[in-house]
Amino acid sequence: MLSFIAIVLLTALILLFARYSHLLLPNSPPLLRMVYGMKHTFDFIYLGPGAALDKFNESLVKTLFKLPTLSNSPATGELVSAFSGTDIDPETLAGLMGHHIFPAIGRVLRSQDFLERISPALATSISEFLKTQSFPAITHSLSELVGAALISSISQAILGPLFPPDAITDLRTLDTSFYTRMLGFPLTGSQFRDAHSRMLSRIEVYLALVETDCSGAWPGFPLVQEYLREAYSNDLSTRNRAALFMTLVWGLTAAPTNVTSWLLAFLFDDPCALAKVRHEVDSVLQTYRGDVVKLISDPTAFGPSSFPIIDSAIKETLRLISNATPFRQATCDFDLDYGGNSLKIRAGEYIMANTRAHNMDPSVYAHPQTFVVDRFLEGTVTKRDHNSIPIGFGGGKHACKGRLFVHRHIKAFVALWVSLLEVEVDGDTETYKVPKKMERSFNVAQMSRPVMIRLKQRRESRS
Ligand code: HEM
């Protein structure tokens, strides 16, 4: 009994200390920071001081996200601060991102003009990359290869020729080590720290070059320009400009790499699904007389109404691997009604949308553990669903700003891959299985082990 009381008291003391240690010891040594970091992580990932609603139906999540009484500010500040390492305090940062930088880049990323300008550039880069990889004697890690291809297409089409070509490895490291970094334990996260500091220096140089040579000769220049305009009008220092820009580059490359790698792994594991995608790609190519170059140069080729099966496969992959927990803070007291129940939410409390619980609920999706390539097929062709946002992108005013862009990017990648390459999974029966999801991943799950593949050119494409 005594030891039970001691444990309870000790836990209460640690939590209390964690809550206020930053006031007492702003420069607390690593062990204390660990306790404080742990408290933040628990807030961030699990409960917060408020209510964690485990199970929603889709419309509740979407309705919830639209409520004006809920704000996402605290979460944004903490997350961007942890990733970027700026010296701006999280609250100010949340305001800066939420009211200035996100809306500004969101306007560019959803503009039809921008999307159609960027599409041929991305597709050209992807196809050039894929054509150089098809040597059957070489074994590749699927996600390394996808990451390299997507990062290089972002780099060529959006960031332009001034962006350092050797940033690929560090960008991948930032993604794979961010979860550990977020935990804030001492003696961990050194991989993240090293990659972070190298990237930051490179991005500082890059932005300085862009500012002096703003010829804007590459298609994605408007996005970089818009970012810089906001950064300057908010008086950001050189270092903070680079740090926040790095967060943008991370957004453009990390989750898209994971989603695309999983999508391909699911297809390799399911020959019928792959055949359906291949049939779709071949049929679309026929409308371009089998000419891949014509497909690539059509600005509308990878838009929302093209390749409905690939579109469905992207949504299905996101359903299976998203572990996003978008959450909001109540700005005033209110009653949250859901499924005939009502929950009192008080100002300051958090609500976390457990999207995984929704995505894996058999009453929402039959056989939720199974990859069904055309599960979302019907939805993609109706006007209503064009506007609907897969739950893995969050919802309401703060839904993912890059979602329209990333759909095109992944669609172009998968269509070109299927059209240009044949794949053989390398290894024994164990390696043929779809890997497990790594629970310690941020936003979308990474794979628990690499999938090794060999590639060969599918056919002579006209180019
Ligand atoms: C498959 C890839 C992606 C996934 C799964 C994803 C997922 C998400 C999720 C779950 C949120 C939180 C939404 C909420 O709180 O309601 C978010 C926010 C955001 N995403 Fe993405 N994202 C992806 C790609 C991108 C890309 C390519 C960009 C481009 C830079 C981007 C930019 C953003 C921004 C700026 C926000 C903050 C929106 C706000 O708070 O107003 N994302 N994303």
Image: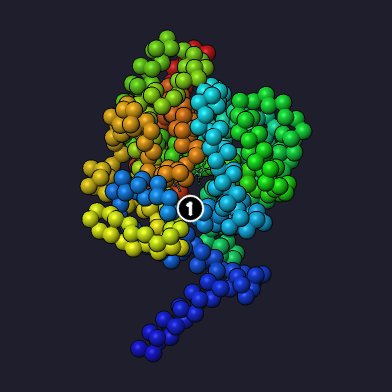
Residue 451 seen from this side:
no
> Which colour scheme appears in the figure?
rainbow
Name the residue: 52% across, 17% down: 297
Is residue 14 visible in the rendered image? The answer is yes
Q: Residue at x 38, y 24 (%)?
A: 305
Whether residue 71 is situated above or below residue 212 in the rendered picture: below
Q: Residue at x 28, y 59 (%)?
A: 342
Give the total number of marks visible in the rendering: 1
Name the residue that disc number 1 marks: 72
Q: Position of residue 96 (x, y in %)?
A: 60, 49
**Residue nearest the observer in this picture, 215 or 102:** 102
Q: Which amino acid type is marked by label 1? A: Asn
Quarter of the image with the N terminus in it: bottom left
Question: In the image, residue 304 lies at what x, y percent?
Answer: 41, 27
The answer to whether the beta carbon of the residue marked 1 is less than 8 Å from any atom of ligand 1 is yes
Q: Residue furthest right?
A: 212
Q: Position of residue 280 (x, y in %)?
A: 35, 21
**Position of 41 compared to 54: left or right?**
right
Q: Nearer the viewer, residue 363 or 165?
A: 363
Indicate whether 400 appears above or below 131: below
